[in-house]
Amino acid sequence: MPKKRILFKSAERTAGSVWPALARVVQVNLGLSDAMSLDIDGLVRDLIALGANGVVFNTGGIYAWYPTELIHHGRNPYLVDRDLVAEMAASASAEGLSFIGRYDFSLIEAPLAEGKEDWLTLGVDGEPLEIGGPRADGLPALLATAMAGDYRRLVAPEIIHEAQGRTPLDAVFFNAPEPFPDCRSDTPQPSDPKEAEAAFFQNWGLWRDAVEKVDPACRILGRFNALQYRSLRHLAETCDVLTSQPLDWLDGGASGQRPSWFAALTTKVGRRAMSDEPPLIIVHAAPGLSWRHVGLPSAEARMWLAQVLANGGGLWQTLTALPNAQADRRMLEDVAWANRRAEEAEPWLTNTRSLASAGVVVPRRWHHDADHAEAAGIVDALTMGRRFYHPLTEEDLTADGLEGLEVVILPSVECLSDDEAEVIRRFAQEGGCVVATFRTGWRDETGVARPVPALADLFGISSAGERIDDLYAGYLALNADTPLTERLGDTALVAGQGPFQQVEPSLDAEVWAKLASPFAARGGVGKPPERVRRPELSKWPSVLSTGKTVYFAHAVGSLITRYGLPDHRSLVLAVLDHLAEPQSVQVEAPPGVHASLFEQDDRLILHLVNAVGARPLSECVPVYDVVVFANAEGMRTVPDGTDLASRPDGSFVLEKLDVWQMIEIRPHSPS
């Protein structure tokens, strides 16, 4: 097979040698009517002015942006006699931009699907699912196609074959490959996660094969969701670049905004799946579909973009109009800022290896929605405590997947197979540390309940009692002289709402904390005379230790997600302090400062991202005197090259952190 084309070419580093550069892609979401007067060469110049080295452009699917001859492929009615795909490909190539063709097979015009009900997704009313409501200019309605229907399986490959045969592209991207929600289950639209996964990969294989049959050198972008059920390993093995979009949207209100670290988590997931190759992370400048033509506050947008770069990802930024027609031109300033910073920092962002000794399983076999909150809380604790971590999926629960890790954290990974449990047990037997919470291992991989968790012996559990989902006004009562009290200070109690799993400790388990029952019934909490009483200890342990393994019976991650109390984060960090060796690089800063670490040749690259403040960030609040501990000869900020001041205790001080700062750490030479 021919060698794949190099995407995002950098300047020549040696005579005759062109290396791949970090992606700085810009996508312009075009309206159909833009095709009438679109100045392709002018658009390319605008993209270059924004710092782009790649462009995403509509190619085919819902509408063809070239003169298609296929009867079931809608043609942009405003094209007239133009082939915009060929025009853009030629102009982009002449200016050194990579061209990514965007296909979308999720929708089709109603007349093209007439008599083809098996192509479509049916709504709960049994009628074809119409998306977007009445169309502008009297255009036909758009109907949702079925994930397992013949449009995606038979017509889509024909479209790909035609489009790729007309104009060679550097890469292709398939938008919206997922099933539609809220549809009838008896249509070709699988609702079961495993059936949906099988349907996705059947389509994926057909589309990929159609591309490679016509143009084997074209790169193929695979889209993943960090929290969605799908075999990420299989996707990574069958594509050239992984892409994802960790939406920083406000459609659900500020209270529903994704955590400040979600772009970092998504980038880490994609990077690990591709063995440290940078994923391409899609960042939308707008605050959501409700307001597509205005931007996020600049401080919020830049914090989100910085996370992608600081965790080893490439940028794919989207605009909602042509640059010269953008109403909120502040969006353009943020796009250009991120691309400029990425280009300046490229020598320290490419050919790097991410460093972390802890792995956190981000469950993809969800049994309860609460699993999302549990994993999110653990990631939050690590981020706010500036602990370097690798995200893991259940596919990583193999001997090879855990190699090189010191600690594995299982945040209520309820479904574990016997083989996966045995891998974790052997990891512990060989000296690894394990932290587990709540319902880890309580079901097998098919969802069948177990009487006790698969790793009960490792967790120090002899038998199980009831699962409590609505514990109210409870506490964790800390036993004296444990690693928990060392970090939390002078307190005997920590807030401990539900959910909670009753367990009996085994003889070899140490009880670090117990459940303290609510000191009054729900209606009497805080009312006299009960408010003067102290909570009473129950017999149920809340935290158990068996040497290098610690088990939380409380869903401690969910507590972090729901309440954000520092005590709950401290419980997790205290356990890691006890189990793991100190990190080779440690950072002292406020909780809103995020950190990530990479190795490059004989130096380390530390990234600091400033997310301090209430979301969405209205301004960047500078952080002063960030302290970095490492066994190093020196440190300097890059790319500007300012040396950090050293202190007698061996630490170094960054005087001021704005949005994002890279620090080059030069380790001591071996003696």
Image: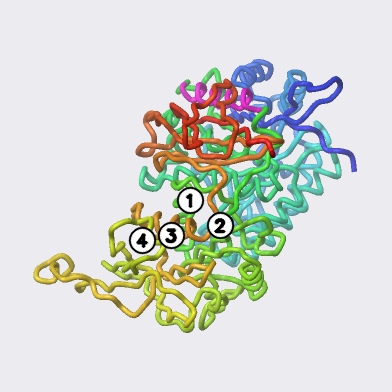
In this view, the residue in front, 79 or 308, is 308
Amino acid type assigned to the residue bearing label 4 in the image:
Thr
Question: What is the crowding at mark 2: few (fewer than 14 residues within 10 Å), some, or many (at least 20)?
Answer: many
Q: Point out the stretch of residues depicted in magenta.
A: 330-346
Residue 187 lies left or right of residue 659; in this view the side is right
Where is 424 relative to 362, above or below? Answer: below
Q: Tell me if label 1 and label 2 are in contact, CB under 8 Å.
A: yes
Q: Tell me if label 2 and label 4 are in contact, CB under 8 Å.
A: no
Distance Cα–Cα, label 1 vs label 2: 10 Å
Residue 372 pos. (x, y %): 48, 59
**Was residue 174 drawn as part of the magenta stretch in this picture?**
no
Q: At 65% across and 30% down in the image, what residue appears? A: 348
Distance Cα–Cα, label 4 vs label 1: 19 Å
Query: Mark 1 = which residue?
Result: 382
Query: Which circle marks residue 360 in the picture?
Result: 2
Q: Nearer the viewer, mark 1 or mark 3?
A: 1
Q: How many marks?
A: 4
Amino acid type assigned to the residue bearing label 1 in the image:
Leu
Q: Secondary structure at mark 3?
A: helix
Query: Which circle marks residue 557 in the picture?
Result: 3
Amino acid type assigned to the residue bearing label 2 in the image:
Val
Query: Mark 4 = which residue?
Result: 485
Distance Cα–Cα, label 2 vs label 4: 24 Å
Q: Nearer the viewer, mark 4 or mark 3?
A: 4
Q: At 53% across and 78% down in the image, what residue appears? A: 456
Where is 305 relative to 153, above or below? Answer: above
Distance Cα–Cα, label 1 vs label 3: 11 Å
Where is the N terminus found, in terms of image quarters? top right
Q: Tell me if label 4 and label 3 are in contact, CB under 8 Å.
A: no
Where is 217 relative to 227, above or below? Answer: above
